[in-house]
Amino acid sequence: MNELILVVDDEAKIVRLARDYLERSQYRVLAAADGRTALAIARQEKPDLVVLDLNLPGLDGLDVCRTLRRETDVPVIMLTARAEEADRLIGLELGADDYITKPFSPRELVARVRAVLRRTKGDSQLPGGRQSGLIRAADLEIDLNGHNVKRDGTPIRLSRTEFNLLATLARNPGQAFTRAQLLDRLHGVAYDGYDRSIDAHIKNLRRKLEIDPSEPRYVMTVYGIGYKFADEEWH
């Protein structure tokens, strides 16, 4: 069955454009013009991906993203204005998987949707040393096949992008990755992103994984380079 995409934007022209191009690419599309309607549709229809404008009337996109992340791991692509870097960072820290700046090409939107959906369905194909099975470090357990993470036996809910980022690092313990390399691993070399998006995902990942995010044990900063996964206490 073709994937279901929920497009949330209060600009009817953008919704029509997005719907036209997504449907031409064989996706099914639902639309909402405000945050409360978007949440109601998401809860009832369970879309495969949400395209979410941040500037919505009433309940704004950040609140919608925050609520979606509490309830589900559905991938979220944010729509933002070019001047709203701070909002992009906040959205990524709330668990959004990607962003597109307005004005945008509808072909870019389709490409981003396809890429995010491909990542959610093909996480085990991410490049890296360990391709399957369990990875353990201290009290952290990462199930690469089941896409589950536990700390001391307690499940930790991660977004798909957060899990993919963790898996990329954990498959290569001790190896330092630059931000550009992590962007390439997560999105592909043609991705037109910015390095601070990786910082936002790392911050969110640490908040969920670490007992004390200010003193991380798993996802380590390599100053002047980027990030690595701790290479101690492996089994």
Image (cartoon, grey):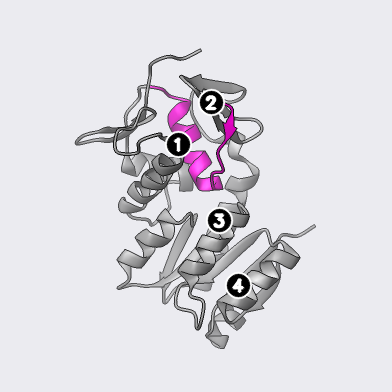
- Please tell me which of labels 1 and 2 falls first in the chain: 2
Classify residue 21 as left or right of residue 126: right
- Please tell me which of labels 2 and 4 falls first in the chain: 4
The three-letter amino acid code for the residue at tag 4 is Val
Residues at discs 4 and 1 in contact (Cβ within 8 Å): no
Q: Quadrant of residue 132?
A: top right
The mark found on residue 209 in the picture is 1
Secondary structure found at label 3: helix
Classify residue 1 as left or right of residue 231: right
The mark found on residue 7 in the picture is 4
Q: Mark 3 sits on what residue?
A: 69
- Please tell me which of labels 4 and 1 falls first in the chain: 4
**What residue do we see at 56% from left, 43% from top?**
157
- Real-space Cα distance between discs 2 and 4? 38 Å
- Please tell me which of labels 1 and 3 falls first in the chain: 3
Within 10 Å of disc 1 (Cα), the crowding (few <14, some 14-19, many 20+) is many
Q: Which residues are magenta?
A: 152-173
Whether residue 155 appears in magenta in the rendering, the answer is yes
The mark found on residue 127 in the picture is none
**What residue do we see at 36% from left, 27% from top?**
217
Secondary structure found at label 4: strand
Classify residue 94 as left or right of residue 195: right
- Real-space Cα distance between discs 1 and 3? 16 Å
- Please tell me which of labels 4 and 3 falls first in the chain: 4
Secondary structure found at label 1: helix
